[in-house]
């Protein structure tokens, strides 16, 4: 029997942790394992359920950055599909950055699903995510600031490959793309903006592939409840985006350090629990 409270609490957790650089997938695996929540990660409809929560996040991000997206679409229209103005160039940079995660996700989907079964591995990757965030703060000190639309195509692709690391539970999509953005010379706020903008197409593409599975005959979850959970995730994701953009606009140094310490502590704590439990 699926516990409705667990589904909605999972949605709240998803909405918060998807944008904070602390790995929503990692928290999803660890919380359901360590707290013995009645959510079966091995059901065929669990991944589509996760995708609906991500779609809630994507909708919240599109709403939050609606002016940016309107400017991007307008720029592409003015340039007639070419990268002839800053908005059109940024749009195509986001497209380039989306490609690696999309291709690698399709190629290694079955192998990546296996990682969901090992909470110890997920905890270790969560701790590693914290180390990556600490490295990101050091990268910020070495780089000159630049605007996202001035990135080279190669650097956009680099951020895209960083995003692909988030296919591993425990590695944060927003965290690794923030760090990659800092490494290319963006400041915290612009790296976060680029990271949040590039989240929308990759999550939308995943939704097109996975959501139809919820309507299959073997589905164990109520479709209505799942979409309610997606709405809840979206509300909390919107609040998270509002908080984080203001946070990164106000912090010029070591902005990732609190999240890094949390990930290392939570990852090592969870790993100890798994090994000793």
Image: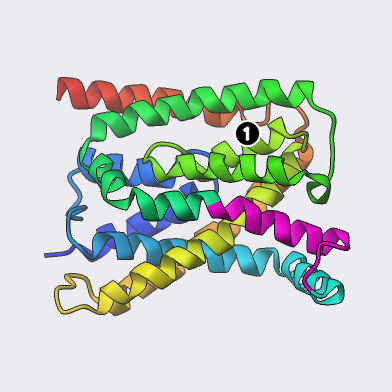
Q: Nearer the viewer, residue 43 or 247?
A: 43
Residue 247 in view, yes or no: no
Q: Position of residue 72 (x, y in %)?
A: 77, 67
- Please determine whether, in this image, residue 119 is positioned above or below residue 42: above
Q: Position of residue 18 (x, y in %)?
A: 49, 50
- Please determine whether, in this image, residue 199 is positioned above or below residue 177: below
Q: Which residues are magenta?
A: 81-99
According to the image, label 1 marks what residue?
Answer: 179
Q: Horizontal placement of 243 versus 140: left or right?
A: left
Q: Nearer the viewer, residue 224 or 185?
A: 185
Q: Horizontal placement of 244 versus 223: left or right?
A: right
The part of the image, by quadrant, that contains residue 276 is top left
Give yes or no for residue 80 being in the magenta stretch.
no
Instruction: Report the predominant secondary structure element of the magenta stretch.
Output: helix
Q: Nearer the viewer, residue 14 or 107?
A: 107
Give yes or no for residue 91 being in the magenta stretch.
yes
Colour option used: rainbow
Q: Position of residue 133 (x, y in %)?
A: 57, 28
Q: Quadrant of the N terminus?
A: bottom left
Q: Position of residue 187 (x, y in %)?
A: 77, 37
Give me the residue at 67% from left, 56% from top: 94
- Please determine whether, in this image, residue 66 is positioned above or below residue 19: below
Q: How many marks?
A: 1
Residue 122 in view, yes or no: yes
Indicate the secondary structure of the residue bearing disc 1.
Answer: helix
């Amino acid at each position: 029997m699926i516990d409705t409270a667990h589904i909605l609490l999972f949605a709240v957790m998803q909405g918060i942790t998807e944008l904070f650089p602390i790995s929503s997938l990692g928290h999803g695996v660890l919380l359901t394992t360590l707290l013995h929540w009645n959510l079966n990660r091995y059901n065929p409809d669990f991944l589509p359920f996760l995708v609906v929560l991500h779609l809630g996040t994507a909708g919240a991000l599109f709403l939050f950055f609606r002016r940016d997206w309107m400017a991007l679409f307008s720029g592409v229209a003015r340039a007639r599909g070419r990268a002839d103005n800053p908005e059109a160039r940024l749009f195509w940079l986001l497209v380039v950055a989306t490609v690696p995660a999309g291709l690698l996700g399709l190629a290694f989907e079955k192998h990546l699903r296996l990682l969901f079964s090992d909470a110890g591995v997920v905890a270790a990757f969560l701790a590693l995510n914290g180390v990556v965030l600490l490295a990101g703060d050091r990268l910020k000190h070495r780089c000159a600031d630049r605007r996202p639309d001035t990135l080279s195509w190669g650097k956009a692709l680099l951020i895209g490959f960083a995003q692909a690391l988030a296919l591993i539970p425990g590695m944060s999509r927003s965290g690794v793309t923030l760090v990659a953005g800092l490494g290319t010379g963006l400041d915290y706020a612009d790296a976060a903006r680029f990271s949040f903008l590039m989240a929308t197409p990759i999550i939308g593409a995943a939704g097109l592939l996975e959501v139809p599975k919820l309507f299959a005959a073997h589905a164990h979850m109520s479709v209505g409840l799942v979409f309610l959970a997606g709405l809840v995730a979206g509300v909390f994701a919107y609040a998270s985006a509002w908080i984080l953009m203001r946070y990164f606009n106000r912090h010029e140094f070591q902005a990732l350090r609190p999240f890094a310490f949390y990930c290392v502590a939570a990852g090592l704590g969870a790993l100890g629990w798994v090994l000793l439990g």
